[in-house]
Image (cartoon, coloured by chain):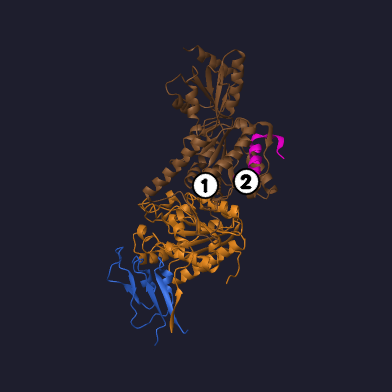
Chain colours: A blue, B orange, C brown
Amino acid sequence: MAKKAFIEIDSERCKGCGLCIQACPQKIIEFSAEFNTKGYHPATPNDPNEKCPGCGFCYNNCPDTCIKVYRMVNE
Amino acid sequence: MQAKVILKRPESLTDKEFTYCPGCLHGVAHRLVAEVLDELNLRRKTIMVAPVGCSVFAYEFFNVDGTVAPHGRATAVATGIKRAMGPEKTVFTYQGDGDLAAIGTAETIHTANRGEKVTTIFINNAIYGMTGGQMAPTTLEGMKTTTSPYGRNVDDAGYPIHVCELLQNLKGVAYLERVSLLDPRGIVNAKKALKKAFTAQEKGLGYSLVEMISTCPTNWGLSPVESLKWAKDKMLPEFPLGVFVDRVGDVK
Amino acid sequence: MAEKTMMKGTEAMGEAAIRCGARLYFGYPITPQSELPEYMSRRLPQVDGNFLQAESEVAAVNMIYGAACTGTRVFTSTSSPGFSLMMEGVSYIAGAELPAVFINVVRGGPGLGDIQPAQSDYFQATKGGGHGDYHLIVLSPSTLQEAVEHIELAFDLSDKYRTPALILADGMLGQMMEPVELPEFKDLESLPKHDSWSLTGMGNREKHIVTSFDINADVLEQMNIRFQKTYREIERNETRCEEFMMDDAQYAVVAYGTMGRIMKTVVKMARDEGIKLGLIRPITVWPFPYDTISDAAEKVEFMMTVEMSVGQMWEDVRLAVGKKIPTPFYGRTGGVVPTPVEIFEALKKQMEVK
């Protein structure tokens, strides 16, 4: 099954609030073990099975516009 | 196959990082307003009025002309701006529960009553955030805050104020809805409400207000995720969601 | 054509404002100036202007703030208790460097007071009624003609220095009728443009922010230092004062506004009796003509301040004079207007004091 979509999270902007993690229906976002310079564990995508459908729930729930959502398209 | 961005920060927001607490839904509300300004192509003719409260810096985050009003007076300031500039410009206020429903009650009611063609985004999280968690007019019965440490006693402090219910009979109101930012469906609906509210202004129909049930993790003493649940369990029964006034009709 | 007509003070000021290009008025009824909003409600629609009776003076001053943010000429009027309500807004307008014109038709106070003329808001006007390190430019007319001219001056100075201006009038001036020559209608296109900072919607330019707020104390201090530079410039350029029969004066009186007008009668009464009395009449009470008064103190035996208060401008006179000569005071307050005869009696008593 080809990759449909993926996300990028600005780890420096992220405040580790966890709203994207709880919103994601596919459960493919988790807290990073690393810290960012603010001292938070930023959210980070973890999608080895390429389950992300590009639904945008994470983007919608993120209060800090940290997330960019990409869809794969035929050009 | 090529990767195409389908969702990213709207043009009507600057790049400045929000100064809000982690998980505070102000950021979601800001983004929705900005998305609507982008989609309705209003950005270059919009002037915003920030309140006093956590969002006192809102004019830094929106990519539009902006000012900050004295506490409670944003709708009066918006009245002055709109009447000076005329219908070609879009004016909105962004206010919390203290700003709009305590100190600003008179301005709120009269701006709505006059049907001023401005739009208000009202963030209701039942507490005073910026000043450290005091009781708000919308604080729930029994809810503990720093100025109601034993829980809000309605015999003493009255009941939580329902702003939409208060304003709905004023004839100057063209669009009035209470929405929630507490889950993806709520957020999608909140954006639709904002679109209708700004459309009410664009069509010169009258005053529009969208009340957004929101959270305050820091002063509620809950995590951002726990706050969503608490708000759903406790605030939605007190503040029912719905459309109170709609003179706009269908909007794409 | 400049028009000469007989008008009531409040209405004359309103008409003057319209001729100076103001097409926006937000105000609230309060005695003794309710005729001003009433007049504006009739006149503004006639000139395609916008009138709104706000729900309170608090709302009104904030509507003024909003309109001023757009760089549009705007003004309001009120009386003492109403001006107290506006203090927060005045501070914000000063701190945000916005042009706006205020008219305070002062009445007896404090509190609800009464509706008769007074001068007991001098401190509030000149020492800051609102919070923070700011000043209003304060003009104090003594005749309706002067009031009409001060309206134009207030708008011009306010636009020039980007700071609010106040016409400190009183109930006498507001309610009396006398002939005035009204200015010509200004061409709205000739009014100062504030395109470099005003909130008008971005269009093709970068966004503008109007604020009196900075969370960084060092930055806020620099803002205040910049305001102070402007105030010093206003002091250098805009201090206005009338010296009436001061050339050969042996004694001087200091009075402003309506009191200044009454004192001209007292000066003439004194001169009729061979007493060499002169009057110093501050026209701007901020900036205050300290130098004129200090210089005059070198030449006269005493300088008596006369006010419709318990002595507020009196403090500035004493500051200017120091210990050079005696600085007595005569005043009536609570809305009582002293007569020339009683003032003259008090003056003669002062002359006997050696």
- Disc sitting over residue C98 in the figure: 1
Above or below: residue A66 compared with residue B122: below
Q: Estimate the x, y position of residue C285 in percent, counting from the top left.
A: 52, 32
Above or below: residue A1 compared with residue B83: below
Few, some or many C-alpha atoms within 10 Å of disc 2 (few <14, some 14-19, many ≥20)? many
Q: Estimate the x, y position of residue C87 in percent, counting from the top left.
A: 49, 41
Q: Is residue C151 visible?
A: yes
Q: Estimate the x, y position of residue A57 in percent, counting from the top left.
A: 42, 73
Few, some or many C-alpha atoms within 10 Å of disc 1 (few <14, some 14-19, many ≥20)? many
Q: Estimate the x, y position of residue C212 in percent, counting from the top left.
A: 45, 48
- The kind of residue tagged 2 is Ala
B30 and C207: which one is in front?
Answer: C207
Residue at mark 1: chain: C
Based on the picture, tell me whether residue C25 belongs to the magenta stretch. yes
- Quadrant containing the N terminus of chain C is top right
Q: Mark 2 = which residue?
A: C22
Above or below: residue C94 compared with residue B137: above
Report the span colored magenta. Answer: C1-26
Are the residues under marks 1 and 2 on the same chain? Answer: yes
Q: Which element is circle 1 on?
A: loop
Residue at mark 2: chain: C
Residue that lies at the very extreme toward the bottom in this rendered image: A1
| Disc with the residue nearer the chain's start (1 vs 2) | 2
